[in-house]
Amino acid sequence: MDSNDLTPEVLRRLRKPRSYPAVSLTMPTHRRELRNDEDPVRLRNVLAGAVHRMEADPDISKAAFLAVRTQLNEAVAEVDMRHKRDGLLILADADEHQVWYLPRETPESVVISDTYLTRNLVAATAQKPRYWVLSVAADRAKLWSGDGESLQEHRADGFPMTPPEETWDVEREERIGDTPSTFTDEETRKFLRSVDEALAAVLAARPLPFHLVGVAPALALLEDAGTTARSAAGRLAKGGLTDGPAHVLWKAVRPVVDQYGRNEETEALARLDDAKGRRTFAAGLDEVWEAVRERRAGLVAVEEHFQRSARIGDGHLIPVDGEDGAALGREVQDDIVDELVESALDGGAQVMFLDDDMLAGHGRIAAMLRY
């Protein structure tokens, strides 16, 4: 499955407790590089590592071991190397298996627990921005759904939009937008007002950042005609893009989308700095864990590849040394950060994944507290 298939309902199902062992395998993959022939070998090695760990685990019965190994073998056989992206996630327990293709690099790891590792899926979704792009001219408007590095035209909710035929006036042509307008100023405003209202309805149902694309006069008239367009996350004043195609529009709008992402990251860091001054700040794994458990965390920022094995004792985390915590048995959480992220989402917190070392001074993880 592709990370695009990760809906809140799917995530809730994946995060439910499972009979031990629930195995999660992750590894980086190569899309088109010359090294992509290494991926099948690496996958076999990761599988062998999982099998070895299950064999050595005294808490895993022979029947459970055989059932999970069968599911893992079937999952590996289903991996389509032609569909590869930047990372691969395989989930398996005694009853089922799933294969997920991720648009972000993942570390090579084996996690054995009583829940699946969903952190990489959440991170892939969080770091793959979802947004709208409204491309507009004086005589038409199209809405595009953005998902990471792809755009798809949204053909619903009234889009694509064109003026009513009765507004067509062949006696008068004014250039308003990136094509000649064939209706009067007032008719243009009326049309763009309807575009603004349709966009508002879409945002009410699916509130995401949106970006506007069109020549400057068309964008100015759209903002003047309504109110929604004024809150755009980004604008690209460029003509000739109203009809796409999607890959051309994406190439043009990508700098705007990327800049918005950088601004969001900067804002998150500023919010954390402000929280330190107001003493509503937590840093380090144990402090953030406690804040998340008490549902006091409003924002949790964590470095992409921060992972730590730990056991829980007296409401605190006790770090565990050793490879994936394997030597210390079932009571050890192989990746306690994954469980922390899940708990933060359950508590309604915003979770943001930052580049490695951006939180080096705060123990790789920090939170802004609600109180």
Image (spheres, grey):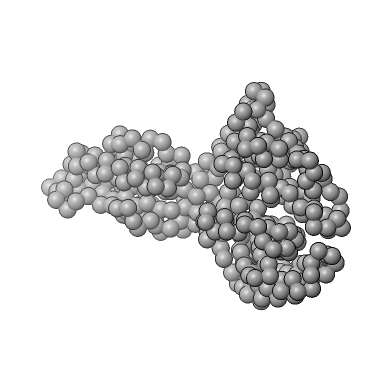
Point out the image quarter for the N terminus: bottom right
Give 83 or 75, whichever is nearer the viewer.
75
For the point 75% across and 40% down, the residue is 315
Left or right relative to 331: residue 258: left
Q: In this picture, is 33 found above or below 66?
A: above
- Whether residue 218 is visible here, answered yes or no, is no
Residue 14 placement (x, y as % from top left)? 60, 59
Give 354 or 26, whichever is nearer the viewer.
26
Left or right relative to 34: residue 45: right
Residue 33 placement (x, y as % from top left)? 67, 65
Left or right relative to 204: residue 337: right
**Image quadrant in which you'd find residue 16:** bottom right
- Whether residue 125 is visible here, answered yes or no, is yes
For the point 38% across and 56% down, the residue is 154
Residue 325 placement (x, y as % from top left)? 83, 55
**Image quadrant in which you'd find residue 95:** bottom right
Residue 53 placement (x, y as % from top left)? 82, 65
For the point 83% across and 58% down, the residue is 329
Give 368 or 143, whichever is nearer the viewer.
368
Q: In this picture, is 44 found above or below 370?
A: below
For the point 16% across and 48% down, the residue is 167
